[in-house]
Image (spheres, coloured by chain):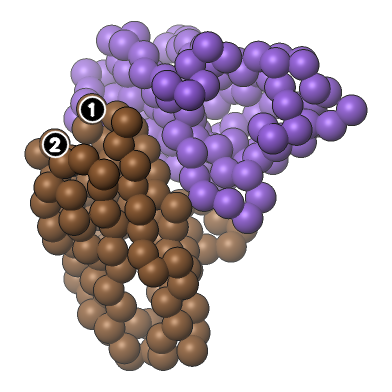
Chain colours: A brown, B purple
Amino acid sequence: EIVLTQSPGTLSLSPGERATLSCRASQSVSSSYLAWYQQKPGQAPRLLIYGASSRATGIPDRFSGSGSGTDFTLTISRLEPEDFAVYYCQQYGSSLLFGGGTKVEIK
Amino acid sequence: QITLKESGPTLVKPTQTLTLTCTFSGFSLSTSGVGVGWIRQPPGKALEWLALIYWNDDKRYSPSLKSRLTITKDTSKNQVVLTMTNMDPVDTATYYCAHSDSGWAYFDYWGQGTLVTVSS
């Protein structure tokens, strides 16, 4: 069974800085079936990225996804105040699985 | 506009069966490619996928919980029902239902979630 490991667990950054979040799979993710979500306290998750690099409807272009195989990255080019949240990756190929999350907090 | 809303008990006792209903609008579960899934999140912890049902009645379950889960749909009522047997305090979580499209299993619309507490 595939395991998704997200790192770091917590990322402390200032507004305007660049955030780089990692999602590593224990086995290759077929056809880049990898999604990213943002979750703020008390809210449901919001889809940001699917297919490893396609932005969902209405997602600002400061969010970008990349990677293939076992290594995937979510990049936020310049952090806005509303971007401080928890981010989850999800594999949706042969199995359905979420990673453990990365919290992006204000430094 | 796609919306989903979860409903069910907020408190269940250990060993009981949990039944949750997802009532949705803005799409039809008879449309090719559409699916509705259930995901849960224990307090302060990560998301965990539970089950997914597609427009063609194909069903997928989390391997670790498969023996306890049943997902069904009622297309005429725009509802999806999840049952989970033998509830335990570790099953305390916010339970979400969510929409998927195009035959894929990522979730583009989510309900607000419902907190279920398992306690005697």
Q: Is residue A63 shown to the viewer in this render?
A: no
Q: Secondary structure at mark 1?
A: loop
Q: Is residue A81 above or below residue B64?
A: below
Is B100 rendered above or below residue B65? below
Across and down, in percent, residue B47 comes to: 49, 45
Q: Are marks 2 and 1 in contact (CB under 8 Å)?
A: yes
Residue at position x 48%, y 11% in the image = B72
Find disc 1 in the rendering and name its residue. Answer: A94
- Gap in Å between the C-alphas at discs 2 and 1? 7 Å
Label 2 sits on residue: A30
Q: Position of residue B88 (x, y in %)?
A: 73, 26
Mark 2 or mark 1, which has the lower sequence index?
2
Q: Residue at x 57, y 14 (%)?
A: B68
Res B8 seen here? yes
The N terminus of chain A, quarter of image: top left
Above or below: residue A28 compared with residue A54 = above
Looking at the image, the residue that sits furthest to the right is B120
Dots 2 and 1 on the same chain: yes
Name the amino acid, label 1. Answer: Ser
Q: Is residue A75 left or right of residue B41?
A: left
From the viewer's side, name the closer residue of B35 and A105. A105
B99 above or below B56?
below
